[in-house]
Image: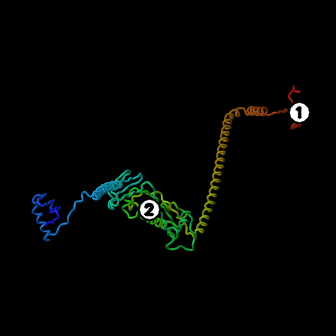
């Protein structure tokens, strides 16, 4: 049960899993110093006996390493690591939640998608400008929709194929003998002709939630609506009207069709003026332009002739009015003169009837008085005694008579 040393002393240090610490110091006098827990001496003996007999497997001996410096260093390192990990976890949590803060700018609407669905009901879905918070991605997703800026879609299904350089410069592609099916776009007019039409639709978003989430691709839907309006309007106009005669009415027809379709689908947008360009097929466009130029020349000459006619008519009307005014004025003067003479005649008639001879002499005297008063030179020719006529000779352009008394 024990090993003997040469000095006859035995020292045992046992550590058991039952919580007993044994320190045995045996001398020759068989003195024992035992330190046991309560009721543990019997168990300790049975354990020692079992180890001798091999009935019970020995438990691994646990040696306390509390005083080992390497163990203490490892323990302190682990405690420091755990503290650093806790701080890092706290920082990550703060960053995780603070990353959900976002700002909605002016002329912009924000929508929070939580697991793919908008958060809120009705008008509360669209967030107003300012700071907001949401769970970080992938729980929440922030969708920002511009409200103030103008958007545009272009319809080119009725326009021939053009490369980007031609689009930027605004050049038309070179004419070909015929249209290329599937490449060049065109529309049919009401008179069975072919023309090219290109339209641009400008709009602003007034309902961001419906515009963004009610349709798979609202922009593509608007482009399809614009294409529909272009083809629809072409069936209402002849080629000549759509190209030259009434382009504004053609544009209005396209715009009205677009407005009806957008109102029908309620796309959440407000329309701005639509621009529409029309062109004859490029291979026959010179002929169209020649006809148009002839029409312009004809209209120019017609307008010039109408201008000359209007000018001549105004001049004739002016002259006629002047003649009429002069005739009226002369007739008024004549009437007044005749009326005055008639009044004078009526006044003199009683005098004439009383003494015609006297009346004649008085009138003759008045007339001679007026003549002598107005005449510069007066010549008096009395009758000859023999009754023979006198010969009167007058010198014309004679020198003026000097007044008497002047040298």
Taking 37 as reference, is 52 above or below it?
A: below
Number of marks drawn: 2
Q: Is residue 17 visible?
A: no
Quarter-wise, where is residue 56 in the image?
bottom left
Question: For the residue carrying disc 1, how many other residues have a C-alpha within 10 Å: few (<14), some (14-19), or many (20+)?
Answer: few
Taking the spot 43% from the left edge, 54% from the top edge, the residue there is 148
First of labels 2, 1 by sequence position: 2
Image quadrant where one finds the C terminus:
top right
Quarter-wise, where is residue 117 in the image?
bottom left
Q: Are marks 2 and 1 in contact (CB under 8 Å)?
A: no
Q: Please provide percent x and percent y for residue 340.
A: 67, 37
Taking 405 as reference, is 324 above or below it?
A: below
Q: Please provide percent x and percent y for residue 394.
A: 87, 37
Q: Secondary structure at mark 1?
A: loop
Q: Is residue 340 visible?
A: yes
Question: Which residue carries the number 1 mark?
Answer: 384
Marks 2 and 1 sit apart, C-alpha to C-alpha, by 118 Å
Question: Which residue carries the number 2 mark?
Answer: 258
Left or right of 362: which side holds 328? left
Q: Please provide percent x and percent y for residue 216.
A: 38, 64
Of 147 and 237, which appears nearest the observer?
147
Q: Residue furthest front?
A: 7
Taking 113 as reference, is 337 above or below it?
A: above
Q: Please provide percent x and percent y for residue 369.
A: 77, 31
Q: Secondary structure at mark 2?
A: helix
């Amino acid at each position: 049960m024990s090993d003997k040393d040469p000095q006859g002393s035995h020292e045992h240090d046992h550590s058991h899993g039952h919580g007993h610490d044994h320190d045995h110091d045996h001398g020759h006098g068989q003195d024992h110093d035992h330190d046991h827990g309560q009721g543990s001496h019997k168990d300790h003996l049975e354990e020692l006996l079992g180890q001798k007999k091999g009935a019970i497997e020995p438990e691994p001996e646990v040696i306390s390493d509390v005083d080992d410096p390497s163990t203490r260093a490892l323990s302190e390192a682990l405690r420091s690591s755990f503290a650093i990990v806790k701080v890092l976890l706290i920082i990550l949590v703060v960053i995780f939640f603070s990353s959900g803060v976002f700002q909605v700018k002016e002329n912009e609407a924000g929508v929070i998608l939580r697991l793919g669905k908008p958060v809120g009901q009705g008008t509360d879905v669209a967030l107003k400008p300012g700071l907001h918070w949401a769970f970080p991605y992938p729980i929440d997703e922030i969708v920002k929709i511009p409200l103030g800026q103008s958007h545009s879609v272009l319809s080119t299904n009725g326009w021939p194929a053009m490369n980007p350089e031609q689009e930027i410069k605004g050049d038309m592609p070179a004419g070909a003998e015929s249209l290329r099916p599937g490449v060049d776009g065109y529309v049919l007019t009401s008179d069975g002709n072919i023309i090219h039409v290109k339209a641009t639709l400008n709009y602003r978003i007034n309902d961001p939630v419906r515009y963004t989430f009610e349709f798979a691709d609202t922009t593509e839907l608007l482009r399809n609506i614009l294409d529909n309006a272009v083809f629809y309007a072409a069936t209402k106009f002849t080629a000549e009207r759509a190209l030259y005669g009434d382009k504004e009415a053609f544009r209005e027809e396209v715009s009205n069709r677009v407005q009806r379709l957008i109102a029908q689908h309620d796309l959440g947008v407000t329309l701005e003026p639509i621009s529409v360009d029309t062109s004859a097929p490029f291979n026959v466009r010179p002929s169209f332009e020649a006809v148009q130029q002839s029409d312009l020349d004809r209209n120019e000459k017609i307008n010039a002739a109408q201008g000359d006619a209007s000018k001549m008519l105004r001049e004739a009307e002016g002259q006629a009015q002047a003649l009429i005014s002069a005739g009226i004025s002369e007739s008024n003067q004549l009437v007044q003169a005749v009326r005055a003479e008639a009044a004078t005649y009526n006044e003199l008639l009683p005098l004439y009837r009383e003494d015609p001879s006297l009346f004649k002499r008085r009138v003759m005297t008045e007339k001679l008085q007026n003549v002598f008063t107005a005449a510069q030179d007066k010549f008096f020719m009395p009758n000859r005694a023999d009754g023979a006529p006198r010969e009167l000779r007058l010198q014309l352009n004679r020198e003026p008579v000097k007044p008497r008394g002047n040298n």
